Image (tube, rainbow, N blue to C red):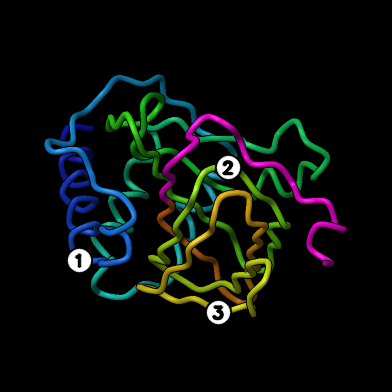
Amino acid sequence: MRVNRDILRDELIALHARTPALGAFCALPDPLCEQALVPYVSPAAALMQADPGGTTAAFERLRDALVAATPDVRWRETYKDTDIGEDFVSKFACYQLIGPAEAPFNAPDMRSFVVWTPPGLHYPWHHHPAEEIYVVLAGEAEFAVHGAPSRTLRPGDHVLHASMQPHAMTTRDSPVMAYVAWRGDLTTPPVFTLPEMVSL
């Protein structure tokens, strides 16, 4: 675990440094300090381990560090008690990387996560008070943002979500792995968006 965290920290710092949109969105604490957490591995974690997706050379070390950290982090089941169903919950892999608590690294005013979904999964329209940025690390997915055309994003591409702006994501023939950062309201969880809110 010592080696995993050191590599993971170095790669996260490098990601923020070499991704202008991410660096502009939120600054990492300096130093980026470790904190204690109680590990929990969700069923979806094994899917990400088995098929993390293709990647560019720029993100290979980060991708591998994110997979290697699997047993030592607290995997999230954000939608477990919603109406979306067990199939989605069992395939949506996510854990927090940086944040005030339940993350390997501490930051008081931002949170970041890795999100992975397998081929052929639709992440329905949802929204949250936090402002958000997605940076694709591996694979590809179609990203939909209310009020803008859908776009297929690949490694190195990013998308911004304003506070309470509905957004969705769909994978086709490959999985997607993305780095996700939040700023603003860090405590209110996402909720699914009512159909009438995205039909306007």
- Give the distance between the C-alpha atoms of the residues marked 2 and 3, in whole angstroms: 24 Å
Query: On the rendered structure, is 116 left or right of 30?
Result: right
Residue at 20% x, 53% y: name it: 11
Query: Residue 158's x, y, as percent?
Result: 42, 69
Residues at discs 1 and 3 in contact (Cβ within 8 Å): no
Query: On the rendered structure, is 105 left or right of 67?
Result: left
Mark 3 = which residue? 152
Which image quadrant for residue 70? top left
Indicate the amino acid at tag 3.
Thr
- Of pointers 1 and 2, the one earlier in the residue sequence: 1
Query: Residue 57's x, y, as percent?
Result: 25, 74
Determine whether the residue tagged by mark 3 lies in a helix, strand or loop.
strand
Q: Residues within 10 Å of mark 2 (few under 14, many from 20)?
A: many
Against 26, residue 31 (above or below) is above
- Give the distance between the C-alpha atoms of the residues marked 1 and 2, in whole angstroms: 27 Å
- Could you tell me which quadrant the N terminus lies in? top left
Residue at 18% x, 60% y: name it: 17
Indicate the amino acid at tag 2.
Pro
Against 76, residue 55 (above or below) is below
What range of the chain is rendered magenta? 181-200
Mark 1 = which residue? 18
Determine whether the residue tagged by mark 2 lies in a helix, strand or loop.
loop
Residue at 58% x, 58% y: name it: 117
The residue mark sitting in front, 2 or 3, is: 2
Mark 2 = which residue? 129
Which image quadrant for residue 148? bottom right
